[in-house]
């Protein structure tokens, strides 16, 4: 059975795995139950003061945040 908090992600452009280092189990609750850090880079809007896009660390392309 698939784990509910399996937060594996892929770059929408080239399919690079964006899953980073594992998060220690006792700290996962700080990250919404995520099991791994993410390698994607958040691009913030100064106007909106929040992350509006993600960037892939490998191909440097970005995509809209869902
Ligand atoms: Zn990429």
Image: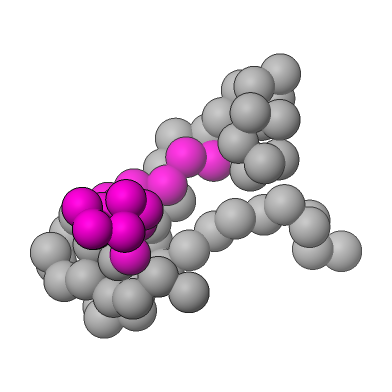
**Percent position of residue 31, x then y:** 60, 36
**Percent position of residue 41, x then y:** 27, 51
Q: How many marks?
A: 0
Does residue 61 appear in this view? Answer: yes
Q: Indicate yes or no whether the magenta region holds residue 39.
A: yes
Q: Please identify the dominant SS of the magenta region.
A: strand
**Percent position of residue 46, x then y:** 20, 52
In the picture, measured across the screen, residue 14 lies left or right of residue 6, that is left
Residue found at the very far front of the displayed protein: 47
Q: Indicate yes or no whether the magenta region holds residue 3.
A: no
On screen, residue 42 above or below 25 = below
On screen, residue 59 above or below 47 = below
Q: What residue appears at the point 79 percent right and 63 percent down from the top-left corner?
A: 2
Does residue 16 appear in this view? Answer: no
On screen, residue 15 above or below 57 = below
Q: What is the span of residues highlighted in magenta in the rendered image?
A: 36-52
Q: Quadrant of residue 34?
A: top right
Q: Nearer the viewer, residue 66 or 34?
A: 66
């Amino acid at each position: 059975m698939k784990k509910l908090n399996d937060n594996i992600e892929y770059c929408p452009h080239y399919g690079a795995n964006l899953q980073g280092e594992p998060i220690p189990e006792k700290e996962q609750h700080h990250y919404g139950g995520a099991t791994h850090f993410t390698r994607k880079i958040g691009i913030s809007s100064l106007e909106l003061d929040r992350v509006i896009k993600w960037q892939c660390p490998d191909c440097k392309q970005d995509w809209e945040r869902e």
